[in-house]
Image (tube, rainbow, N blue to C red):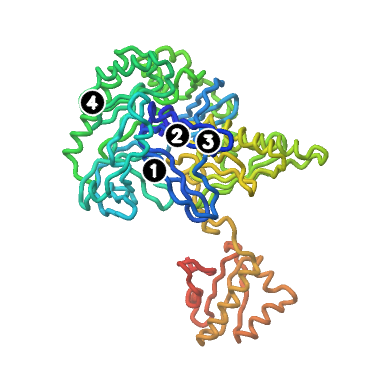
Amino acid sequence: MNADGLEPTSQVEDAARSGPEWIRPAQGRQPQIVASFHRRTPTLMSQGCAAGIRVATRARRYPLLPSVPDLRHRQLVTPRTRSMHTEIFINQGIHESRIAIVEDGDLAEIWVERPEAERIVGDIYKGTVTAVLPSLQAAFVEIGLERTAFLQVRDMVEAESDDESNGSSRHRRSRSFPNIQDLAKKGQQLLVQIAKEPIGTKGARVTTQLSLAGRFIVAMPNGDWVGVSRKISSWNERRRLRDVVRKLRPDGFSAIVRTEGRGKPEKDLRKDLKQLTRTFRRIQKRDKRLKPPAVIHREIGMTSSVIRDLFTENVDRLVVDSRDLYDEIVEYLKQVSPELRKRVELHRDKKPLFDVNKIEGELDKVNEREVWMRRGGSLVIDHAEAGTFIDVNSARNTAKRDQEESILHTNLEAAREVARQLRLRDIGGIIVIDFIDMHDERNRRKLVDAMTEEVKRDRAKVSISPQISEFGLIEMTRQRVRPNLLHTHSEPCPTCEGRGRIMGADTTITKIERWLRRAYAHNSDRRFHLRVHPEVAAAVRGENGRRLKDMRKATKTRVDIVEDATMTLQDYRFISTRRELDVTAEHLIRVGGNNGGRRSR
């Protein structure tokens, strides 16, 4: 993960990992991606009907399906460093904590932490290998969660320095991996760290390359190198930091100086590194004492990690509404960054913090499907298993005389809003954006450049296609570490079972007719009470009861309609008059356990 706050978590992969570099294509040539990540470099491949993303240690080529756009030439976008007015607001509730980041007056990011849904990225577990899969070059590890964790071979190989001064980047990218069979055996016990939370039906992704993040340093046991954040550009400062940390680090530890370590004296770096090594010694002791599956180390909470990772000199102020939390933050900053204490404020107003700063109203809109833009256009955001799809709709008052120019302005505004919504909703994985069609190639180029520029605010790793596809789409990927905000704070609809649509009354009536025909074929009962939604009942009785008469005649049954407002449009229940039982399930065709009618509750 990006060290300087991809999200507030301890799995901060700063420094040598934080600065992806990409080279703009020379004239007439395709762009080439040069990635400078310490452990995991996004590598693009095709998967099914849409492009997928895999994470690899070094850039690797995968065959692409001919029907899928070639995504290997996407640009890895470097975060923008332009100064902006940034504020952090922390609301401490009774059962949840909320953190909002506001940039230039716009809500940019939101995190919510609840006791029943605590994040686990950065936690360290002791687990047991339950299966080794040579075909996937991966293994499954039982760590005590609902689903077994997934461990790839590239996440078992010892990390290498990614600092510019350490060898050829080409050599590092061409690094090969041993076979998973040589590294993991069924029944083997391993210490693993959560790199990616469980999402959907997939278990957590883990790594055996442990890392502990401090305010100024990221420490990794079982290594022997030193790196410095690429965001520290001064050669003299980089050399100073490297020399200091080399002198301070214990044997068997690798260390990366984070961006926040710039300009810090040796005593501050020593204190940070000492705390990290002390933590790892505790981890070693628990590892020897506990049997798998077991939690060996819990990462610090969301609020603490935000203060550690995101509250830097680039933040103008931090406002909290809890006196205890305010005191804790001030005390922490007194030790690590005393110059930032004056930027911390305690909210004393009786009105809620998020109400006063107009955040609550924005949060109410976060999970809405349609997002309206200032000029009148809108975005429609749809989530699917394969990815997220965003449709851009134009404003109604688009003038025909300047249609191309108006469409360009709408698309440029949409690019800004899409970039904001991706961060705000924490949408990751594959993202496809259907902008309004433009015929002028220069305008199409402007749109791609604008989209590339807008996502630079994002601390997550983002890769974006260098041009609009022949179908008018821009494809991109955004690093996904946890489920997005919609899935975290909502549940599938029990009526439509998460599909977003339900059957209409006519479809339900057709299913009822088929049920009666199956009952007739099995010489079943001949008299039923049919319980349905009032709208379905009205449709059955429509046309002077003709449809009901036809059903009775074709199936030689007597059906009496009973309206039930508590039922859904797609639900129906047959009650046998003779047996006085709900017999709906007796004549249903089951497909994967789902059917039109449902058992009596």
- Report the amino acid beneath label 1: Glu
Circles 2, 4 touching at the beta carbon (< 8 Å): no
Residue position marked by numbered label 1 in the rendering:
197
**Disc 4 to disc 1, C-alpha distance:** 26 Å
Q: Label 1, label 3: how many angstroms apart (C-alpha)?
A: 17 Å
Residue labelled with disc 2: 34
Q: Earlier in the sequence, mark 4 or mark 1?
A: 1
Judging by the rendered image, the residue that carries numbered circle 4 is: 278
| Label 2, label 4: how far apart the Cα atoms are | 36 Å
Check disc 2 and give the amino acid type.
Val
Could you tell me residue 592's position as x and y percent?
A: 46, 67
Between disc 2 and disc 4, the foreground one is 2
Q: Is residue 464 above or below residue 599?
A: above
Where is residue 150 drawn, in percent x and y? 33, 48
Is 329 situated left or right of 130 in this image?
right
- Tag 3 secondary structure: helix
- Depth check: give the residue in front, 6 or 472: 472
Mark 1 neighbour class, 10 Å CA radius: few under 14, some 14 to 19, many 20 or more: many
Residue type, label 3: Arg
Q: Secondary structure at mark 4?
A: helix
* Residue found 55% across the figure and 59% down from its top: 496
Farthest residue to the front: give it. Answer: 28
Please report whichever mark, 2 or 4, sits nearer to the chain's N-terminal start: 2
Instruction: Look at 65% across and 43% down and name the residue there.
Output: 435
> Is disc 4 in contact with disc 1, using a CB cutoff of under 8 Å?
no
Alpha-carbon neighbours of circle 2 within 10 Å: few (<14), some, or many (≥20)? some
